[in-house]
Image: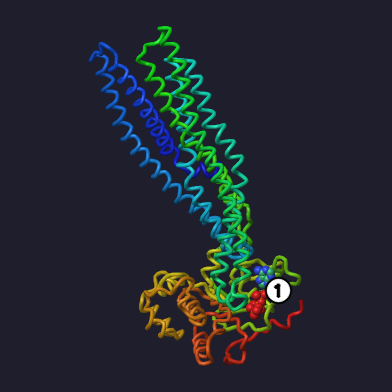
Amino acid sequence: MREVLALLHGPRTALAVVLGALTVLCGAALLAVSGALVTGAAQRPSTLLVLMPLITGVRLFGLSRAALRYTERLVTHDVTLRAVTRVRARVLERLIPLAPAALTGARGGQLLSRVRADVDELQGVVVRLVAPAGVAVLAGGTAVALTALVSPATAAALAVLLLVLGAAVPAAAARAGRRAAVDAARADADVAADTLDLVRGLPDHLSGDGGATALRVLGGHLARQEEAQRASARLAAVTTACREGVPGLGLVAALWLVGSDVATGTTDPLLLAACALGVLGSFEAVGGLGAAWSAAGGVRAAAGRVSDLAATRPVVTDPAEPLPLPAGSALAFDGVRLIHPGAARPALAGLHLAVADGAKVALTGGSGAGKSSVLALALRARDPDAGRVTLGGTDLRRLPLDGVRSRLAWSAQAPQVLGGTLAGNLRLGRHDATDDELLAVLSDVGLEGVVATLGLDGWVGEGGERLSAGERARVGLARALLSRADVLLLDEPTAHLDAASAARVLGLLAGDPRAVLLVTHDADALEARWQVVDLGGLDR
Ligand SMILES: Nc1ncnc2c1ncn2[C@@H]1O[C@H](COP(=O)(O)OP(=O)(O)OP(=O)(O)O)[C@@H](O)[C@H]1O
């Protein structure tokens, strides 16, 4: 929580609180002065000497209140937008080092839901939490002090009722509502994750039981979500009744206590309505606290989850004192052993492999032989459990992570194509590539047809769904080819291609001056210049 508050701009937040408190006090003063004015006007004889300052006061407080509220909103929104930027940056900063290995256990929908919900919660920390709390203390305290000048007993009653409405009622409501909020958050996350899984896997569900099982599970989570919402609504009804009732009690108390003083002649009758209405207006000071108490739990939970992200150890980290990047980019695996977390047997054991500068090496072997794991080690998505992987003769663990990855271009088995344009997806490989360079590489990988139908600036659909699996694979390949990396790590780039397209891609790679480490199931399609390494025969 402290970490989240540190992300706020202190002086601007303080200004927002002061402006909020002044707005509330102007509102209370407007009511008080109006009460005094009505009483003064009703008195016989009423004198202009008494009425004029009151009339001026009504105008002053009325106009000031509007101007102060406007300025307060401007400042609060400015603070909020700054907080949003910082919170988003902080969450992403924490996520990036965890990718890809430390995030493979997380469900995509839950991760999405977590990032969205946490950012939403934390961005409202000023409007929903800090500003209402500050305004309550500042405006409430000032209102009690001013009331004490007229009637100490009324001030005491006001202080007690402010505490009841601002602290006791919301605390009780928050305690009662915490469970419902936790249930709602869990149900929301499950519904989001299930919906995303259902939509992504729609074709599989439809060809199975028509989606009945998935819908049944989703239905259960929706019912839990609804029940949690009902519980919150019941609670909201009770707190609304208190919110309306307690200020009424304050009004009655002020009329009674100040009225007694007026009756005994110790207080000017002009002050009766002024004090009673001023007390009524003062309750606006704690008006935001109900929402603040309920927001507090959510904000604390969101802050906790963002901290948890920080506590999640990245699988690989930058060395404290990285060595300079070596001149060459020859890759070597020396006696490498790798066991994935939770796996019963090592994915790789005693692997020795060299990929010299410009070499063409093809990895083959049965499914699960460890081919993709070799690429993951080269990229330093993971570190070996034994042995070492070197780049230009230096252990990867001693080199800067960014530097290592700038030397390597990777195209996954099913490359990630983002919802955007074809050109945008390709420029992930090289941001400054010209349109001509993009068209050339697309032609190299045989995607002229896609260029003709979509165009470079055509929308490829969410996750590239307007492209076939083979086209997506070739977009990934084109992205790798475009990059300025020295080594291309390609995971089955020909898997979805027909024989002619596959031969064209393999020919292209064989002619590329850079080193290529290729994963393939079809060693027969390779030309003689490829060095084929079969991982299927390794002794584990
Ligand atoms: N993240 C992971 N967590 C646990 N086990 C993993 C993980 N990734 C891979 N494995 C296991 O490691 C072994 C090697 O996997 P890898 O993906 O490297 O094989 P592969 O040869 O590329 O297989 P395929 O040809 O099917 O893509 C497999 O037994 C796999 O189940």
Q: Is residue 380 visible?
A: no
Number of disc labels: 1
Classed neighbour count for the residue bearing mark 1: other residues with Cα under 10 Å, few (<14), some (14–19), many (≥20): some
Classify the position of the N terminus by image quarter: top right
Q: Is residue 193 above or below residue 72?
A: below
> Which residue is at 53% across, 65% downward?
403
- Viewer-nearest residue: 494 or 266: 266
Q: Is residue 174 visible?
A: yes
Q: Identify the colour scheme used.
A: rainbow
Q: Give the x, y percent position of residue 433.
A: 39, 73
- Viewer-nearest residue: 313 or 125: 125
- Viewer-nearest residue: 231 or 134: 231
Residue on which disc 1 sits: 347
Which amino acid type corresponds to the residue marked 1 in the rendered image?
Answer: Ala
Query: Looking at the image, which residue sits at the far left?
Result: 48
Q: Give the x, y percent position of residue 484.
A: 47, 73
Q: Is residue 291 above or below residue 306?
A: above
Q: As drawn, is 81 to the left or to the right of 204? A: left
Q: Is residue 22 above or below residue 115?
A: above
**Local SS, label 1:** loop
Classify the position of the C terminus by image quarter: bottom right
From the Cβ of disc 1, is ligand 1 less than 8 Å away?
yes
Q: Give the x, y percent position of residue 190.
A: 60, 59
Quarter for ligand 1? bottom right
Q: As drawn, is 117 to the left or to the right of 277? A: right
Q: As drawn, is 89 to the left or to the right of 33? A: right
Q: Give the x, y percent position of residue 93.
A: 52, 56
> Which residue is at 43% across, 24% downward?
279
Q: Is residue 194 above or below residue 417?
A: above
Query: Looking at the image, which residue sits at the far top?
Result: 265
